């Protein structure tokens, strides 16, 4: 039994390494037409798949091994799933990241006001959304150059996967992108 348990443990370690290696290789193979934002979220998906395999083997192993092995595998699966699911649901970036982003936006050229700075997890890195106010009489070409250069500056940060910059001439309107309008209505 000890040899079989050790063999299974080694096999699972080998499989975990294989899954992580495959996801790492898959992330490097970029096809901009099939995956326009890249494959940086492949690693969390691989870890979730491994966690599901571990949980399934926790259940199957119960018939052959002592109770601690399946419970350990289930706990590992729950930990991995809960740890990675937080980064996949769009949790807000910590205040220090938001401060860093806001500072970069403030220091950028010709920005009158900042309306919104958001950063949220979407896999390993953050998606950033910035709404800025530019002078109303600024020519479209100049406004585009300002917005695009800000986007490039934000995307150079190591913690940012993708940045979206929205340009406007005023900040007095209601937010244009509301999550509340997409929520299902509650039933009485």
Image (cartoon, rainbow, N blue to C red):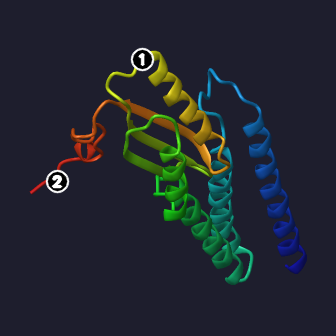
Q: How many marks?
A: 2
Marks 2 and 1 close (CB-CB < 8 Å):
no
Q: Earlier in the sequence, mark 2 or mark 1?
A: 1
Closer-to-camera residue (60/16): 16
Please identify the quadrant where the N terminus is shown. bottom right
| Farthest-out residue, right | 3
Farthest-out residue, left: 188
Which residue lies under the disc numbered 1?
A: 140
User: Which residue is found at the position 76% from the left and 50% from the top?
Assistant: 19
Query: Disc 2 marks which residue?
Result: 186
Q: Position of residue 93 (x, y in %)?
A: 50, 58
**3D distance between C-alphas at marks 2 and 1:** 43 Å
Q: Is residue 94 above or below residue 106?
A: below
Would residue 153 be found to the left or right of residue 165 on screen?
right
Question: Which part of the image, by quadrant, shows the C terminus?
Answer: bottom left
Q: Secondary structure at mark 2?
A: loop
Secondary structure beneath disc 1? helix
Residue in the image at 70% along x and 71% along y: 61
**Image location of residue 120, percent across then percent down:** 48, 52
Mark 1, Cα crowd under 10 Å, few <14 / some 14-19 / many 20+, is few
Nearer the camera: disc 2 or disc 1 = 1
The numbered dot on residue 131 is none
Bin the neighbour count of mark 2 within 10 Å (Cα to Cα): few under 14, some 14-19, many 20 and up.
Answer: few
Task: Give the residue at x 82% y 56%.
Answer: 17
Residue 30 x, y percent position in the rendering: 72, 29
Which residue is more in the foreground, 55 or 172? 172
Q: Residue at x 60, y 70 (%)?
A: 79
* Left or right of 185, for residue 52: right
User: In front: 50, or 42?
Assistant: 42
């Amino acid at each position: 039994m000890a040899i079989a348990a050790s063999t299974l443990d080694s096999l699972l370690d080998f499989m975990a390494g294989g899954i992580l290696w495959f996801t790492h290789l898959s992330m490097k193979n970029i096809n901009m037409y099939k995956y326009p934002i890249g494959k940086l979220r492949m690693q969390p998906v691989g870890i979730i798949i491994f966690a599901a395999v571990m949980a399934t083997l926790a259940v199957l192993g119960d018939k052959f091994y002592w109770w601690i092995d399946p419970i350990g595998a289930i706990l590992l699966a729950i930990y991995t799933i809960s740890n990675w699911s937080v980064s996949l649901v769009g949790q807000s970036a910590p205040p220090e990241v938001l401060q860093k982003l806001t500072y970069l936006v403030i220091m950028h050229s010709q920005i009158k006001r900042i309306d919104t700075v958001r950063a949220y997890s979407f896999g390993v890195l953050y998606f950033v959304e910035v709404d800025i106010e530019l002078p109303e009489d600024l020519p479209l070409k100049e406004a585009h150059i300002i917005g695009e250069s800000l986007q490039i500056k934000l995307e150079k940060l190591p913690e940012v996967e993708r940045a979206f910059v929205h340009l406007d001439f005023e900040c007095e309107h209601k937010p244009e992108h509301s999550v509340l309008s997409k929520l299902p209505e509650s039933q009485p």
